Amino acid sequence: MRLDDTDRRILRQLMAEPDLSTPELAARAGVTAATCWRRLEKLRERGVLKGQQAVIDWRALGYEVEVSLRVTLDKTQPRAFEELIAGARQIPEVIEIQTFLGQVDLRINLVARDMAHYQEVYRERILALPHIADIEALMHVSIIKANEGLPL
Amino acid sequence: MIALDDLDRAFLRALVGDATLSAGELGRRFGLSQPAAWRRLKRLTEAGAIRTRRLDLDREALGFGVTVFLGVKLATKGRVSLEEFERAVTAVPEVQVVQYILGAYDYRLRVVARDLADFERVLRRRIMTLPGIGQVDANVLLSEERLPGPLG
């Protein structure tokens, strides 16, 4: 879908503050509320604007540890990706699974209450997953930026 | 930290799917009166359970076909260089996420670009010119899925 400057201005303001009401958003984007409402409807209809998701603060819920596991797979196994992903989905602490083209095949993001809990999940559940050739852990210390906005 | 019951977890799961749900809609969905749902939502919000909202945009439809994760090591360390790097990297519009991590890298960046040629331009002009930047490793995102994690 081709966006014009008005669409871009609306989306930029909405990305910066997703919970703005339509009149507030319209004022910031410099359009009338009616135009803003119509544009948003069109963006939704075309599937460009799919919705809004709440992002959980795991620390506030008592999950102090967040770790990214960078996994290299044993690619001699044709179903390595599918089987490992299916296994990872069954682990309740896993919050994200990504696949890559590069040195790393897969990233599993997980949260744990503390280091003891992490150790337990890592040893009992992660290391039990099939087809892992190598695994490297990165511990998240802090988030510097995370708006996931697009440079429109 | 806030202790969650099953209904709290169900509320948060619903909001991760759609952050715009009102107390009334949540109440209807889970069999609570509107005021009861409102009180519950207020308690979760005040406890900081929701860090932020994320706009779910169709990146491809908007012309951003490539997402790359970069592992970045700084060449020089020290408080000043960390702050300088963080300030500069946060200002790059194509950089969606910056995480400070412990492990083989110092930072993990999520970068969007229109295509691989555009990514190369961003990498050369915007990333490799950041203050203090050292070794960089890149993995192109093929797929990602988010899971409810401990809310499930």
Image: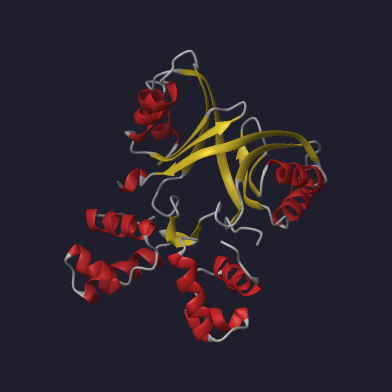
Q: Residue at x 63, y 70 (%)?
A: A4
Above or below for A67 versus A29: above
Locate residue A57: give its quadrant. Answer: bottom left
Q: Residue at x 30, y 46 (%)?
A: B152
The type of colouring in the image is secondary structure
In the foreground, A70 or B74: A70
The reply, left or right, for residue B137 in relation to residue A107 is right
Coordinates of residue A8 in the picture (x, y in percent):
62, 69
In the foreground, B123 or A120: B123
Q: Residue at x 50, y 68 (%)?
A: A18
Task: Assign the C terminus of chain A to one quadrant of the image.
Answer: bottom right
Residue lying at the far left in this picture: please name it.
B31
Locate residue B136: give its quadrant. Answer: top right
Q: Residue at x 60, y 47 (%)?
A: B65
Locate residue A151: give its quadrant. Answer: bottom right
Please say whether residue B38 is visible from this viewpoint.
Answer: no
Above or below for A20 versus A66: below
Coordinates of residue B89 in the picture (x, y in percent):
73, 51
Above or below for B109 versus A23: above
Task: Assign the N terminus of chain A to one quadrant of the image.
Answer: bottom right
Coordinates of residue B94 in the picture (x, y in percent):
68, 53
